[in-house]
Image (spheres, grey):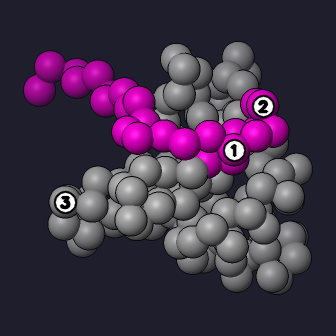
């Protein structure tokens, strides 16, 4: 998830491009209301508890709660993005609590809300260049 101290233009361009591509390709046949609220979100891949997870950063609590009730279209999206058939179908729908700096996330693996201070992230390995 994003760090509020990182310049937006620099750190969000790739995630925004990924978000738009997924919405255009994967959610093309979904309801228009779903596509509209997804355009307000940022998609990324991450790791929580050592497992791959599809992260949907929502602009606010209302969007996160609405998406947490509509998790079926997100099942298998890690497979879609990575072709890793051993990966789980875990997604988290998160929004940041501005006053606390924490993230509230609905985790599809437990069907419950969690509070995360700083999510675990894994950087991609370098290829020696």
Locate residue 64, reporting x and y percent.
67, 63
* Residue 11 in picture, x, y percent from top left: 27, 59
Q: Secondary structure at mark 1?
A: strand
Whether 5 is among the magenta residues is no
For numbered disc 2, what is the local secondary structure?
A: loop
The circle on residue 99 is: none
Mark yes or no: residue 102 visible. yes
Q: Position of residue 111 (x, y in %)?
A: 81, 39
Q: Which mark is residue 113?
A: 1
Q: Magenta stretch containing residue 109, yes or no?
A: yes
| Residue behind mark 3 | 5
Residue at position x 11%, y 26% in the image: 129
In the displayed structure image, the side of residue 52 where residue 14 appears, left or right: left
Which of the 4 image quadrants contains residue 91? top right
Residue 64 shown left or right of residue 47 in the figure? right
Q: Which residue occupies the extreme front position in the image?
A: 99
Q: Is residue 71 left or right of residue 101?
A: right
Q: Residue at x 61, y 48 (%)?
A: 105
Tell me which residue sits at (52%, 17%) in the image.
50
Q: If you read the primary sequence from the N terminus, does the residue marked by circle 3 or circle 1 appear first?
A: 3
24 or 35, which is in the foreground? Answer: 35
Q: Which residues are magenta?
A: 105-129
Badge number at residue 110: 2
């Amino acid at each position: 998830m994003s760090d509020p101290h990182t310049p937006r233009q620099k750190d969000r361009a790739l995630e925004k491009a990924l978000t738009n591509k997924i919405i255009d390709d994967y959610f093309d046949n979904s309801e228009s209301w779903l596509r509209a609220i997804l355009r307000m979100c940022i998609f990324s891949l991450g790791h929580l508890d050592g497992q791959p997870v599809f992260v949907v950063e929502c602009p606010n609590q209302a969007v996160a709660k609405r998406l947490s009730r509509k998790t079926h279209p997100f099942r298998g999206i890690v497979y879609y993005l990575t072709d890793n058939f051993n990966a789980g179908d875990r997604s988290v729908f998160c929004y940041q609590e501005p006053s606390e700096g924490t993230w509230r996330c609905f985790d599809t693996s437990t069907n419950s809300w969690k509070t995360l201070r700083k999510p675990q992230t894994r950087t991609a390995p370098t290829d020696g260049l």
